[in-house]
Amino acid sequence: MVHQNRKHKVIEMPGGNSLTLQVNHRTKRSRDASNHESTQDYTAKVVVQLSKESPRLVLSVNRAQLATGNFLYIPRVALSNVIPSGSPIFELAKQGKAQDILELVGVGQASLHDRDENGWSVLHVSSASSCSLIYKTADRPV
């Protein structure tokens, strides 16, 4: 059995700036061979975006409880460019043209980490358009 408690708050600031705070606390109740009863995961995230066109900064920490009862903390910092949803990479994602997307990324005209004004990534747009985008960039930097 899994119990989740999610909190989400967006603070609108002058000039189109926003600060988003998200917290997710999840408890999984089960018994394993050592009669351990539950594990807990906790994620806290802060998203800072100064305007709809400015880069998006995401700071998060994930705390996971291991089977031994110890906790593992994983911090994460991500910075994404925010580009218009009508830009070439998003149009190609809507059309499912994975090879063309990889060419744009390869010549540095776009990134798989780019986001549109609504926070959607290239993969989100591709998935929403019922397309499959295969990441062939696993062995090379983006």
Image: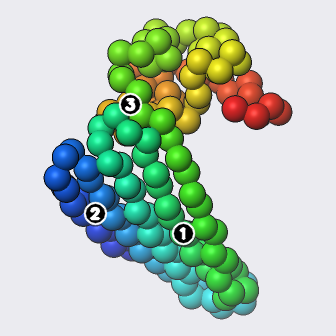
Query: Which image quarter: residue 112?
Result: top right
Among the two numbered marks 2 and 1 on one chain, the one whose residue lies closer to the N terminus: 2
**Quadrant occupied by the C terminus:** top right
Q: Can residue 7 be seen here?
A: yes
SS of the residue under disc 1: strand
Residue at point 65%, 21% (across, down): 108
Residue at point 70%, 18% (across, down): 106
Query: Which image quarter: residue 46?
Result: bottom left
Query: Which image quarter: residue 109?
Result: top right
Residue type beneath disc 1: Val
Instruction: Give how far apart the Cα atoms at labels 2 and 1 are.
Output: 15 Å
Q: State the image coordinates of residue 53 (x, y, percent, origin top left).
A: 34, 34
Residue annotated with mark 1: 61
Q: Which mark is residue 8?
A: 2
Residue type beneath disc 3: Asp
Of residues 125 and 17, which is closer to you in this image?
17
Foreground: disc 3 or disc 2: 3
Of residues 9 and 29, which is closer to you in this image?
9
Contact between marks 1 and 3 (CB within 8 A): the answer is: no
Q: Which mark is residue 116?
A: 3
Among the two numbered marks 3 and 2 on one chain, the one whose residue lies closer to the N terminus: 2
Instruction: Give how far apart the Cα atoms at labels 1 and 3 are.
Output: 24 Å
